[in-house]
Amino acid sequence: MSSKAILLVEDNADDVELTLRAFSRSTIHPQIHVARDGSEALAALIGSEMQPQAATLPALVLLDLKLPGLSGFDVLRVLRAHVRTRMLPVTILTSSTEPIDLVTGYGLGANSYVRKPGSFAELLTVTHQIATYWLQLNETPSQR
């Protein structure tokens, strides 16, 4: 992964395709890696017996909450507990409108909470804003 990459953690194939398409139409073209569940995301970021960790971390993790196996909250707990990923920016990107999910996400250390838009036009705007902020404006300490 490169420092201007995004790890999209999403199990819904339609949401993956729409998100990839939206980012491709932005004026900012980050490299997007996809993890289809929490275990795959943690393997990519921290490593596992079967998969070594990526040499560099992405600039941002876009994390769905409702994932098979490990939930997005479980992934966030592990990321914040691990020295390598403790300060890695994580934006929860979810369709949940539950206030408890918002509070829990921030309580576990999410940097941002964004609800998935209802239309592709809105998704284009959201992905452009995410890319602009997290990949161009935001500065993070070196963790590589």
Image (cartoon, grey):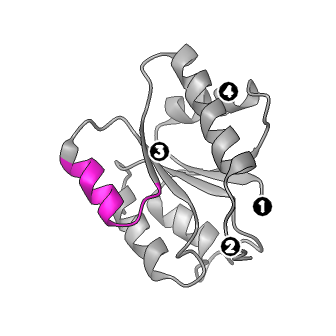
Q: Position of residue 98 (x, y in %)?
A: 21, 41
Residue at numbered disc 4: 21
Q: Name the front one of labels 4 and 2.
A: 2
Residue at numbered disc 3: 11
The amino acid type of the residue labelled 4 equals: Arg
Query: Which span of residues is magenta-colored?
Result: 100-111
Instruction: Please tell me whether mark 2 sits on a helix, a strand or a loop.
Output: loop
Label 3 and label 1: CA atoms lie apart by: 23 Å
Mark 3 Cα-neighbour bin, 10 Å: few <14, some 14–19, many ≥20: some
The quadrant in which residue 69 appears is bottom left
**Is tag 1's residue or tag 2's residue first in the polypeptide sequence?**
1
Residue at numbered disc 2: 141
Q: In this picture, is 118 found above or below 108?
A: above
Label 4 and label 1: CA atoms lie apart by: 21 Å
Instruction: Please tell me whether mark 1 sits on a helix, a strand or a loop.
Output: loop
Q: Quadrant of the N terminus?
A: bottom right
Q: Name the front one of labels 2 and 3.
A: 2
Q: Quadrant of the C terminus?
A: bottom right
**Is tag 4's residue or tag 2's residue first in the polypeptide sequence?**
4
Whether residues under marks 2 and 3 lie with C-beta atoms below 8 angstroms apart, the answer is: no
Label 4 and label 3: CA atoms lie apart by: 16 Å
Q: In this picture, is 32 found above or below 106?
A: above
Residue 3's label in the rendered image is: 1
Please state which of residues 123 and 8 is positioned toward the viewer in this rendering: 123
